[in-house]
Structure formats: C-alpha cells, structure tokens
Image: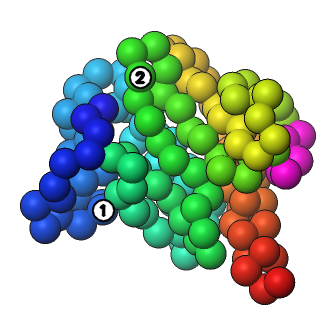
Amino acid sequence: MKKGGPTDGRSPEQLIDGCIGALGDWRGETLAALRQLIREADPEIFEEWKWGGPVWSKDGVICTGEAYKKVVKLTFLKGASLDDLKGLFNSSLEGATRRAIDVPEGGAIDGDALQVLVRAAATANAAARKR
C-alpha cells in the first residue's frame, strides 16, 4: 500500500476505493470485505485517510487498515482495553494499548465478532470523550 502523498482533492472514501483497487489481488478483496463489515457495524462510523491509509473513526480512531505482502491488518488503537471474546486479535499482543488482527490470504474472519469489537471500540471512544 502506498504511504503518504497528496490526496489530489479526493475524499477519504475515494482514496480507500483507489487503495483497494490498486492492490488488485486477495488483499484488496480482503480489505474491501473488512471495510464493509466495519461500516455495517455502526452507520455513524466515518472513513478518514491518515498516515497514508484507511482509518475508521467515531469519537476518535477505531482502527486502521493496512495491506502487507502476506496479511491485511486491522489495528485497533485501544484494542488492549477491549474484550475480545472470540480471540480475533492475533498480532501486536505485546503492547499495552494496541491490538491487531492479521488476515492472511485465504484466512477467514468472524464478521459478527469483528462487528462486536468495532462497536466496543466506538463505545469506549464515546466514554473517553465524555470524561
């Protein structure tokens, strides 16, 4: 995934569409599927383009999306504070704050469990904002 660079006046949604299209392989398909699950989890979640890639936010950042050679990664900025009842977090487990989900080629993701995590992150963001 290309990092940085100008946005040429494109919206975050257009930049994410372009990123998915530019991948042109299983990583684009996987990122598109994860994006759809995130957007369906809460209609008030909005998309941003930060740090050279897709970001989903509501009352603060929920997660970022990144495509690497062997995995598509969703990094939850406050993932360590979330209850991951289905054990989706499988990366960045050593940190005190972040947690990530790495999806390899052919890997399956429990969509319902992902949506629970996304909603929990949005709820945590809202609670932190009220303090």
Element at badge 1?
helix
What secondary structure do most residues of the magenta stretch adopt?
A: loop
Is residue 113 placed above or below 72 in the rendered structure?
below
- The answer to whether residue 45 is visible is yes
Q: Which residues are magenta?
A: 81-85
Kind of residue at disc 1 = Pro
Query: In the figure, residue 120 lies in which quadrant?
Result: bottom right
Which element type, helix, strand or loop, lies under badge 2?
loop
Report which residue position mark 1 lands on.
12
Q: Is residue 29 magenta?
A: no
**Up-down relation of residue 1 to residue 50 (above or below):** above
Side of 58 relative to 119 (left or right) = left
Residue type of the residue flagged with mark 2 = Tyr
* Residue 24 % position (x, y): 23, 26
Residue 34: give x, y in percent of width and height.
51, 42
The residue depicted at 64 percent of the width and 32 percent of the height is: 101
Residue appearing at x 68%, y 55% in the figure: 118
Name the disc covering residue 116, or none. Answer: none
**What residue is pinned by disc 2?**
68
Q: In this orientation, which residue lies closer to the viewer: 105 or 121?
A: 121
